[in-house]
Image: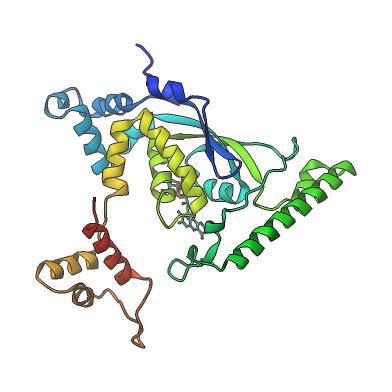
Amino acid sequence: MVRVTVPEADRLIGVKHPVLSHGYVVLVDYMGNDSAIVQAARVSYGQGTRSVRDDRGLIRYLMRHRHTTPFEMVEFKFLVRLPIFVARQWIRHRASSTNEYSARYSIVPDEYEIPPPDEVRHQSTRNRQGRGDPLATEVVERFRADLETVSKEAYAAYSRALEAGVARETARLVLPVAYYTQWYWKIDLHNLFHFLSLRLDPHAQEEIRLYAAELAKLAKVVCPVAFEAFEEFQVAGLTLGRRERMALRALLEGKSPSEACEVAGLPLTRPDGTPMTTGEGVEFLEKLERIRHID
Ligand SMILES: Cc1cc2nc3c(=O)[nH]c(=O)nc-3n(C[C@H](O)[C@H](O)[C@H](O)COP(=O)(O)OP(=O)(O)OC[C@H]3O[C@@H](n4cnc5c(N)ncnc54)[C@H](O)[C@@H]3O)c2cc1C
């Protein structure tokens, strides 16, 4: 038996893909490719399926029907350098293996993230967790200058503490979450798709989305057919709840979107009559927009 490899992916091993000011993603190693998914699936379905369904068709079938374990047969190992505030979001993805740089053993380098001016924006009114409209230039510049000052002062305090003999594990407490950490991260393709579906999404924070985009490019090289199926059925796919299906039926019967929402009990206004900016009705209208603007 010969180990399956992807020459194009082999050429990418060890290559740094920059993200943010000091971060990067490196593909360290991988195991398997599209054929590993097919091979695993055929163990359960048997060789008989080969005649009725080609490899691409089989992978797309598995993705559509959430037959997920064949996708777990492909593994990736990455080296990632990222700010601590991104790492805190990333580490929530438990179905993966992480080994992080230890700030108890080693000195944290003086590298921190200052967002570019167009990424410092107002609190979003629609997405309570996100950023929205642009801010006045002076507000943006003041924030960026403050972040620079705080980071420099924090690192000066860190250096003073180390010089005075404070243990590294204690001295690091002064460092803000804009500082960088790094880790090895190993994950299988199924869970990488889960990570990507959450972290490529516009609801995820911009900074982690940039990392997800780099991971996605690498996964696409190793497993182009599975990645195409992921984009088709997970990224571009839509799920509809019972009320949404009722609203869709009302639309097919000729009702307007707002009438359809009313029929289905999907609220678009508050009890005082003001329009809602979030909630099930608004999200249904967003899904309709996605359908209208499909490319
Ligand atoms: C846009 C966005 C906003 C978020 N906001 C917040 C927030 O405000 N606060 C916050 O705390 N988190 C927040 N999160 C993190 C989120 O709740 C999840 O913890 C994170 O996305 C990891 O997802 P996961 O648990 O599905 O992935 P993984 O941990 O990789 O797990 C994969 C799957 O394995 C299963 N699984 C793994 N471990 C367990 C377990 N112990 N028990 C049962 N099933 C398990 C689950 O089915 C899970 O979906 C946010 C995430 C996103 C994408």
Please give the name of the residue rendered at 36% of the width and 34% of the height, measured from the top-left corner.
220
Residue found farthest to the right: 164
Numbered disc total? 0
Q: Is residue 241 visible?
A: no
Q: Is residue 39 visible?
A: yes
Query: Of residues 208 and 165, which is closer to you in this image?
Result: 208
Quadrant assignment, res 58 = top left
Query: Of residues 170 and 80, which is closer to you in this image?
Result: 80
Residue found farthest to the top: 1
Q: Is residue 194 above or below residue 220?
A: below
- Is residue 107 toward the left or the right of residue 38 in the image? right
Colour convention: rainbow
- Is residue 151 toward the left or the right of residue 14 in the image? right
Residue found farthest to the bottom: 272
Q: Is residue 292 above or below residue 51?
A: below
Please give the name of the residue rendered at 31% of the width and 31% of the height, measured from the top-left corner.
224
- Is residue 194 toward the left or the right of residue 231 in the image? right
Please give the name of the residue rendered at 66% of the width and 64% of the height, measured from the top-left corner.
142
Q: Quadrant of the N terminus?
A: top left
Residue 267: image location, x then y, percent: 30, 76
Residue found farthest to the front: 137
Q: Is residue 137 above or below residue 229?
A: below
Residue 218: image location, x then y, percent: 42, 33
- Is residue 67 toward the left or the right of residue 245 in the image? right
Residue 157: image location, x then y, percent: 82, 51
